Image: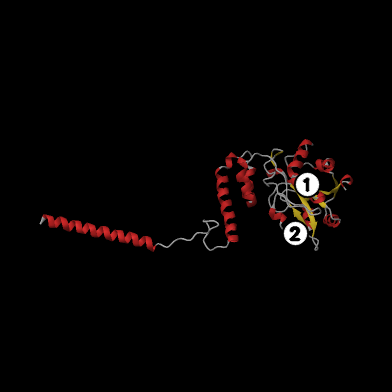
Amino acid sequence: MLIVGVLGILLVLLLVFLISSCVHACSKKAAPEVEKNPVDSRVAAGVSEDLTKEFSTALNQGENLKWIAEHAADYKDPKIPELALKHPEAIDFVANYPSSDGKASAYEETIEKGTAPKLFTWDSRWGGVSFGSSILAVNGSGPTALSMAYMGLTGKGDKTPADIAELVTKANDATEDSGMHSDFVENHLDDLKLRAQGYDSSAANINALLDQGTYLLAEVKENAFGDNAPAHWVLIASENADGSVMVYDPTSPEVSSHPWDSATVAAATQTLYVVSASESAE
């Protein structure tokens, strides 16, 4: 009887093992294979490559912004991490800034004479360069706006915002407010083979001067375009058929993205210059 009991127990255990093995194996076979997005596994499969890349950019920025928030106290100037909050376009620059060497690199994009490129202060090619009390990404609107004018007038990319910032610093014209004193524009453009002439800021002047095919360098007031920005420099780059103007603001992609009424720009401007090539450069 004892042997029969033992055999019965063993038989039960064997049946339990076989049943559990079958269930486990069947479960494995039944589990569907999860399809992955070949471009970025964080994005659902079946999404187009273009849309996947857009999601990837946003996801990467989200990760970078989280890192910036965790290390915000480590930045030498609190205005640097603030850039990431104000302008999503600056997030990658801000995240990479702590590991950068603070040196400038060349501008190698094609430039067409007569067409100013749209540049921003936080561009990785110059944004980390020291300027005034901080870096160009924070207070380099003056050198950046002037660099746009230079490139548009000459068709050359050899004077980047970093190059012009160096000239401004040597002239002792780096300021705490808008970043560049107007004295540099009035007295030191010879090094760039440019010249500047001041005008009263009015809608009529802005439109008439742009009709001549030139560029206007403007120092605008605090909160000039309703964006809570401090006083800074912009380039009034061109006039549209309806009389509106394009403002290339090196501190704001949003301001630079659409036309502005010339009267609005005139009211926002506290200092206005026409910038042109000097006779020696022509």
Residue at image position (76%, 54%) is 247
Left or right of residue 38: residue 256: right
Q: Along the horizontal axis of the image, is 65 left or right of 106?
A: left
Quadrant, the N terminus: bottom left
State the mark number for residue 146.
Answer: 1
What separation in Å lies between label 2 and label 1 (alpha carbons)?
A: 20 Å
User: Where residue 34 is drawn, which disc sits there?
Assistant: none
Nearer to us in this view, 33 or 126: 33
Q: Residue at x 11, y 55 (%)?
A: 2
Residue 58: image location, x then y, percent? 58, 55
Q: Is residue 282 left or right of residue 48?
A: right
Q: Where in the figure is residue 44, as x and y percent of width and height? A: 52, 60
- Marks 2 and 1: which is nearer the front? 1
Residue type marked 2: Pro
- Tag 1: amino acid: Leu
Q: Secondary structure at mark 2?
A: strand
The residue indicated by pointer 2 is: 259
